[in-house]
Amino acid sequence: MEDRESVVVGTLALGYLVVAAGVSFALPSETGLQPLVALALFAAYVAVSRIRFDVGAGYVSAEQLVFVPLLFLVPLPLVLVLVPVAFALSDLPDILAGRAHRDRLLNALADSWFVLGSVCVLGFFAPGPPQLELAPVYLAALVAQIGFGATAALAREYFVGRLTIREELRSAAAAYQLDVLLSPVGFGIALAAAEVGPLALLSIAPFAWGVSVLSRLHRARCDALVAEHEAYWRRFVRDARRLELS
């Protein structure tokens, strides 16, 4: 990262740590800890975070498939810790392979502000297992998730000066479409796990596989568009040179 970006990302990361610590002590949680369930969801979160769609200057992942069950089946204070750690682990292969710098690990905290939105709403108004009659509260939690996440992203891009606010809003709107689409699926999985048992979490696998197929198709389409764009400009430069020599 450049110095300016390091300061901005570091500030967001430190801010998340401070606010998350305060929220952890302030919020009650009616969800008891089931270590095996928490470990399984954590591993699934790391894996699903690798299913990515390029959007604007960044990407969006299919994490909502696991994030929603995590909110209902794991104590909320623990969710504030598990999500950034999962983000860091999901980025580790790229760092070890040299595709990303180790400084990018700070993004695991700086990009986790969205967690605070959902955790605060659920912790204050609807802690415990999922219930259909509390759907308005869950919708508010989704809105808070998007609001916190988008605000942090806008602040980052504004102070780094890499994108305009309009460009970042357009990118955020496209990114959160996937979260909105996957939230009902995640809620259905959480509801089934609460009523039937933890084995219902295995239903995450087919949905994750389907989204991964779409991700690969999306990546192939993006690569094709980039190749087409590069080919066009190569032809343009070649023709311009011919005109200069003629």
Image (tube, grey):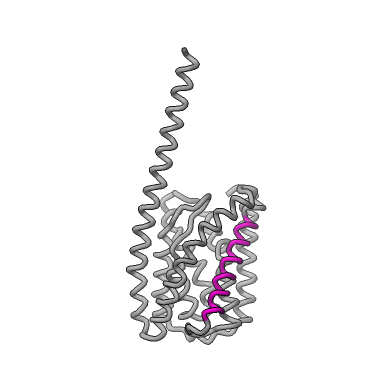
Can residue 3 be seen here? The reply is: no
Horizontal and vertical percent for residue 87?
48, 63
Is residue 41 a member of the stretch shown in magenta?
A: no
Q: What range of the chain is rendered magenta?
A: 135-156
Q: Residue at x 48, y 51 (%)?
A: 100
Judge whether 148 appears above or below 28 on screen: above
Question: In the visual, does 182 lie left or right of 126?
Answer: left
Q: Residue at x 55, y 58 (%)?
A: 173
Main SS class of the magenta portion in the image: helix
Place residue 208 in its image quadrant.
bottom left
Horizontal and vertical percent for residue 197?
36, 84
In the rendered picture of this protein, how many numbered marks are placed on residues?
A: 0
Q: Residue at x 47, y 26 (%)?
A: 237
* Residue at the extreme right: 159
Place residue 12 in its image quadrant.
bottom right
Horizontal and vertical percent for residue 219?
39, 50
Pick whichever, 92 or 174, lies toward us: 174
Horizontal and vertical percent for residue 26?
63, 81
Question: In the visual, does 100 lie left or right of 116?
Answer: left
Is residue 146 a member of the stretch shown in magenta?
A: yes
Q: Residue at x 34, y 63 (%)?
A: 210
Pick whichever, 24 or 56, lies toward us: 56
* Residue at the extreme top: 246
Question: In the visual, does 115 lie left or right of 227?
Answer: right
Place residue 149 in its image quadrant.
bottom right
Can residue 45 be seen here? The reply is: yes
